[in-house]
Amino acid sequence: MSQRGMSDEAPSEGSPLPVRGDRRRPWMDLLEVFARQDETLLLSGPSGSGKSRLAAWCHGRSPRCRGPFQVVDLLSVPEEMQMAELFGWKKGAFTGAVQDQEGCVARSQGGTLFIDEIDKLSLRAQAGLLQLMETHQYRVLGDAGRQRTADVRFVVATNADLKAAVAARRFREDLFFRIHVLPIRLPGLRERRDELLPWARYMLERRHQECQGEGTASFTPEAEPVLLRASWPGNLRQLDNVVRRCYALALMGSPLPGVCVGRAQVEQALAFEQDEQQEAVAPPLLESLRHAAEAFIEHALSRKEGESGLGLEHAEALTGLVLEAGQRRLGDVREVFRLLGGDAVVRSRNHQREYRRELDKVARLESAVGAAPRSPEKPEPGFKTHTPRIPS
């Protein structure tokens, strides 16, 4: 739990972001309107897309800007302590409660309470938060006889699909509708490619200022296209890490006051990133995809006549995605099939024959509607798996 200053998060005036791309985005216009309201604001989007920064900016533009801005990051709060962190506790309320402690709601009085990763809130804490939002009343743990009044604006954020969480009974539907008042979806960096270089330049200059460097810090014209070609699954957080790494590498050959980051430093910084991703992400990704591919394809191949099922088209499409992901990671289709358990996907010749018959049906259907027919492929001798076409 923390109380953040505006200077570290976002400018209090002007654009909600310190940089601008080539075009104005509708969600930014909405954000500027919603920031001035006192209703609950829901920020959703992928991890690292800048939700915390925008929450702080909205506080600075709101009528509560002179009040506190309190942050609750539920990723760092154990589930059994969520109620205590939100509402506070009295001495003796639980083991270890040796003195009274204000909760984040009390510390946000007259200001804004930003609840990050709200999808991680336990069902018990969800009930308490719902009551607070509806009645503006809450109770401190260990002091059930006294209700306190809260004067707080709520900003909540998540990178999860809350509707899916409601359907899975992990998130209360009534709380979802209570927080879904002013919803804003932040796109990831891959959807804001025109902002990538302005962000990188801003982050580099900010890092230079943090190091109290003289002169300027910049990328060479040859370095910037390398940044544009990279993928950024970690969004702004990942970009900031890479820029900091670039700065450190550039200092080795270009001591202060001025710093110039060249193509070699950018490529070296990205190489660290790619090595870490391959080691940390590829094995669990392939393992989960293997199980998904087996389940889908086995279901499609084992259908009986007239039985409803997912269909060969779904199975083929999923397998194509598996192959595409594997090729990007490993560069070899046969090796991908081996790692994905290729023999387990199509286990017998009967399944292979059924697979070809289903593909014939698909080809005839495509021909009937005027699509280009596809001819089934035969597996090579000694290689049991069938390699489906990756859908375009």
Image (spheres, rainbow, N blue to C red):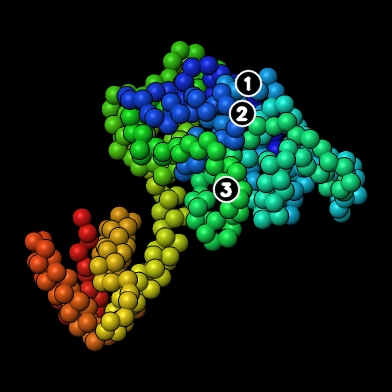
Dot 1 and dot 2 residues touching (CB under 8 Å): yes
Where is 197 relative to 362, above or below?
A: above
Tell me the CA gap for discs 1 and 2.
8 Å
Towards the viewer: 356 or 163 = 163
Q: CA distance from mark 3 to mark 1?
A: 25 Å
The residue under the point 30% across, 60% down is 321
Picture coordinates of residue 265, whole percent (x, y): 38, 32
The N terminus: image quadrant: top right
Query: What residue sits 25% from the left and 67% below the top?
Result: 313
Residue to which mark 3 is pinned: 176
Residue 87 screen position, x and y as percent: 77, 42
Q: CA distance from mark 2 to mark 3?
A: 18 Å
Q: Amino acid at mark 2?
A: Asp
Q: Position of residue 79 (x, y in %)?
A: 69, 54
Q: Secondary structure at mark 2?
A: loop
- Image disc number at residue 38: 2
Q: Amino acid at mark 1?
A: Pro
Q: Which mark is residue 121?
A: none
In the rendered image, residue 163, in percent from the top left (x then y), is placed at: 50, 52
The relative height of residue 40 versus residue 14 in the rendered view (above or below) is: below
Check disc 3 and give the amino acid type: Phe
Residue at screen point 63% across, 21% down: 63
